[in-house]
Amino acid sequence: MKKIENKIMLITYADSLSTDLAGLEGVLGRYFPGLFGGLHILPFFPSSGDRGFAVVNYDSVDPAFGTWDDIDRLGEKYYLMVDFMLNHASVRCQEFNDYMENGDASPYRDLFIHWNEFWPGGEPTEEELAVLYRRKEQGPYFEFTRRDGKNVKLWNTFFAEQVDIDPYTQAARDYYDRNLRRLAAHAPLIRFDAFAYASKRPGTSCFFVEPEIWEVLEIGMEPLKESGVEMLPEIHENYQIQMKMADRGYWVYDFALPMLLLHGLMTGRTDRLIHWLKICPRKQFTTLDTHDGIGVVDVAGLLTDEEIEVVQKEVGLITKPAEAHMKFPSFIKKDDGRKQTYQLMCTYYSALGSDDDAYLLARLVQFYAPGIPQVYYVGLLAGENDIEALKRGEEPRSINRHTYSSEEIAEAVRTPLLTRMFEVMRFRNSYPGFNGDIAVEDDLENGLLAVTWRHGDYWTELHADFRTKAYRIRYYDPERGEEREL
């Protein structure tokens, strides 16, 4: 099992670039040699929905994708990240089935959060309900009928196929221990999906509630201490939450970078981006795109409401043809009762108007930003919005989840855009300068960006003009004793 290293990580489903894990291994070797040191394979376990995120059990790999041998073989070539749903499980899991079958006699009864027992008054007051951080119009609960005929209302943050877990119970600790130890045997990095929703207390937002969130984290980390496996919390919210996690030494995501780059490339400004590059955490994974949409809430405070609106309007014009096929909007309900756009449903390439120059520059800045870059498989191929998936009735996020045929991959990798992007990716993975210190110039004319990495005799600089999309990459080659241009 390879350990984490400072090389680009690919994010993909097991069946997005091929039909299964063995096929994925072949595609990576054939079309993308040298591009990746890491691999985040989105949930590959038996699942009942949410594209793998309603996990039935973590004991096996979904037979449609392969076996643990396939995972381990990939883990010898790439450092792996795998998902664990700290907040919820599938309603088809063995534990939930046992509870539905045996009711209060089930040893798993307390694994789940009973809505009427959570609230001191049996039901939330209007004030308590109003302050909840909600991902759907209905309250975060779902009603189930047990075999004994009793109806029970259980906490349900997301979809009907998922049910929330009470992390404080012994049943949950046993569940975490068993499954996390299994995953730790195969990957050096585990992503705690929907982590912030696991901190619940009456009268609060029930999202990243302090100090409860740190107690939940300690419970989740306990099974990983012996192996030394690290954790990446998946939290889509204001960037200050990432800063809090980083202050405690954890890996974090840079979910602010995508919107900041869109804003810079749409307006020709770099002041907001430069400010972030100078203050952002260094122990982080950077993103432009993921299997979800482009996060909006993450960047509040780094961009003004008006600046965010500029990006939303521009992307809105691009995604307008898809709106008629969207089943539901992407929003959250904040504690003041207002709805707020949560994420933009769009591929990153489409969000930039399918402009090759703008897209390439966005990727180059990501590769030079602090942290380890993650590249989502659709972004790897500069994929455009999949409107046909929406017409087939798939969920809104399917706009950015196209499944590629081998013919589509072979055609895409020959384009000048990707040929150049891949060249820079190989340089990013192999040049020692990126293991050193970063310097971001802050006294340049607005619209310009200069980032330098330096490690011993090695240094490399990216100079970019966001107004013209022109850039220049220079580096020092100690073997030749000369400065070169990439």
Image (cartoon, rainbow, N blue to C red):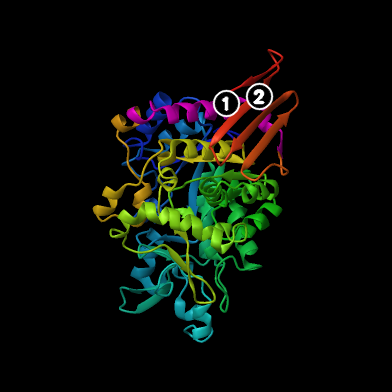
Secondary structure mostly seen in magenta is helix
Instruction: State the quadrant of the C terminus.
Output: top right
Is residue 89 or residue 247 the one in the foreground?
247
Q: From the viewer's perspective, is 177 left or right of 445? A: left
**Residue extent of the magenta highlight:** 411-439
Task: Name the residue located 54 percent from the left edge and 28 percent from the top edge.
Answer: 424
- Picture coordinates of residue 207 (x, y %)? 55, 67
Q: Position of residue 113 (x, y in %)?
A: 47, 71
Residue bearing the label numbered 1: 427
Contact between labelled residues 2 and 1, with CB atoms less than 8 Å apart: yes
In this rendering, the answer to whether 382 lies above or below 460 is below
Mark 1 or 2: the one toward you: 2
Q: Nearer the viewer, residue 444 or 402?
A: 444
384 is within the stretch colored magenta? no
Name the side, left or right, on which 425 lies relative to 52: right
Residue at x 61%, y 53% (from the top left corner): 221
Residue 478 in sight in this render:
yes
x%, y% of residue 425? 53, 30
Q: Position of residue 15 (x, y in %)?
A: 34, 40
Q: Quadrant of residue 479?
A: top right
Amino acid type, label 2: Tyr
Residue neighbourhood size for the residue with mark 2, other residues' Cα within 10 Å, grouped as few (<14), some (14–19), many (≥20): many
